[in-house]
Amino acid sequence: MNKPSNLKPNQETVDYYKNKLEDLLSSIDIKIDIILRDVANERQEFFNGVETKCVNLWIDKIVINNKDVKDLILDYLVVETIDINDDDNKIWQLALDIQNCVYRNTNKKATNPNDGDVYWDLFKKRK
């Protein structure tokens, strides 16, 4: 099984992710910081006892700010890898996790999009 690169994502990659996420979440005016680990955690995946994949987990946490939350930390992530070549669906999924975290921590509930709830704007941006 080939091991993943141990190279830490560069600032260009972090900025790419940050910009894509902030654009996807623009209707709730999110500003984020992506904090990487100094050394990646390695996750190995197995099928029938055979290693099928090895992934470096670089994202330690995401710090979220908007008018409703200050320095909210999202550290339980569905997406912990970061690569400039990641597809839009993977980045969109991370945006959904961030948005749900904000809604949970502000006790907001998603309502009818016809009532002007901006929660649903993210779904309009899904490719």
Image (cartoon, rainbow, N blue to C red):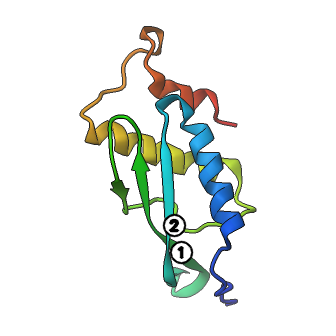
Residue at image x 41%, y 46%?
A: 65
- Which quadrant of the figure has residue 82? bottom right
- Please determine whether, in this image, residue 127 is positioned above or below residue 15: above
Residue linked to disc 2: 80
Other-residue count near label 2 (Cα within 10 Å), few / some / many at <14 / 14–19 / ≥20: some
Residue 57, image x, y percentages: 52, 75
Q: Are marks 2 and 1 in contact (CB under 8 Å)?
A: yes
Q: Where is residue 44 in the image (x, y as percent from the top left)?
A: 52, 82
- Front one among 54 and 24: 24
State which tag comes first along the sequence, 2 or 1: 1
Q: What amino acid is found at the position of numbered circle 1 in the picture?
A: Trp
Task: Please report the residue visible at 58 percent of the width from the left and 47 percent of the height from the top.
Answer: 21
For residue 100, which numbered disc appears in the image?
Answer: none
Residue 14, percent from left and from top: 63, 63
The quadrant the N terminus occupies is: bottom right
Does dot 2 land on a helix, a strand or a loop? loop
- Residue denoted by label 1: 58
Look at the picture and state if 123 lies above or below 7: above
Q: Where is residue 76 in the image (x, y as percent from the top left)?
A: 37, 62
Mark 1 neighbour class, 10 Å CA radius: few under 14, some 14 to 19, many 20 or more? many
Q: Which residue is drawn at 36% across and 25% down?
A: 110
Q: Is residue 13 above or below residue 47?
A: above
Q: Give me the residue at 47% from left, 9% from top.
A: 114
At mark 1, the secondary structure is strand
| Distance between the alpha carbons at the discs numbered 2 and 1 | 6 Å
* Residue 88 left/right relative to 118: right
Quadrant of image for the C terminus: top right
Residue occupying the far left of the picture: 107
Front residue of 117/36: it is 36
